[in-house]
Amino acid sequence: QVQLVESGGGLVQAGGSLRLSCQVSRTISSIYAMGWYRQVPEKEREVVASLAGGSKEWYADSVKGRFTISRDIPKNTLYLQMNNLKPEDAGVYYCNRFGTGTYFNWGQGTQVTVSS
């Protein structure tokens, strides 16, 4: 079973930046599409960005122009560069497969807190 380990979250002021990392225990290039998901209390987990085929990027409207998803194949790592952070970006961020309707076991996530 694939293991996912997210890291890079933290507390940042509005306007600041963070880079999230997701270490994948499988060769990441064998996974066609992966995404970053955000969960906040009392809301369903939502996808904020996805990367398919290594080059097809998709972003939620709320993060478009501020977040960038990428991957490092030799490191089997998925990244999310988050710039110009806003308080509404706060939440626990997870990575996982995207677009298939099935998921790997979820990791522990990484907490992002944005102070105004």
Image (cartoon, rainbow, N blue to C red):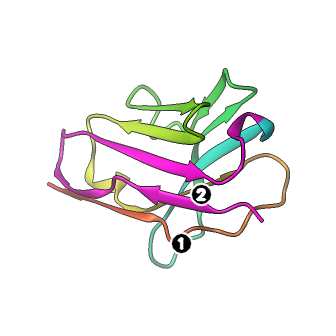
| Quadrant (top left, top right, bottom left, bottom right) of the N terminus | bottom right
Mark number, residue 43: 1
Q: Is residue 17 magenta?
A: yes
Q: Secondary structure at mark 2?
A: strand
Q: Residue at x 80, y 38 (%)?
A: 30
Check contact, mark 2 vs mark 1: CB within 8 A.
Answer: yes
In space, the residues marked 2 and 1 are separated at their CA atoms by 8 Å
Neighbours of disc 2 within 10 Å: few (<14), some (14-19), many (20+): some
For residue 69, above or below residue 3 = above
Which residue is depicted at the point 85% across and 50% down? Answer: 100
Is the residue marked by circle 1 packed among few (<14), some (14-19), or many (20+) residues within 10 Å? few
Query: Is residue 65 one of those drawn in magenta?
Result: no
Q: Residue furthest front?
A: 74
Which residue is label 2 attached to? 46
| Front residue of this view, candidates 28 and 90 | 28
Left or right of 16 on screen, residue 111: right
Q: Nearer the viewer, residue 71 or 64?
A: 71
Q: Position of residue 104 (x, y in %)?
A: 74, 63
The magenta region covers 1-29
* Apparent side of residue 39 relative to residue 90 in the rendered image (left or right): right
Residue type, numbered disc 1:
Lys
**What amino acid type is highlighted by mark number 2?**
Glu
Quarter of the rendering occupied by the C terminus: bottom left
Element under label 1?
loop
Residue at 65% x, 63% y is 3
| Residue sitting at x 41%, y 63% | 110
x, y percent for residue 46: 59, 57
Q: Quadrant of residue 113?
A: bottom left
Q: Position of residue 24 (x, y in %)?
A: 62, 51
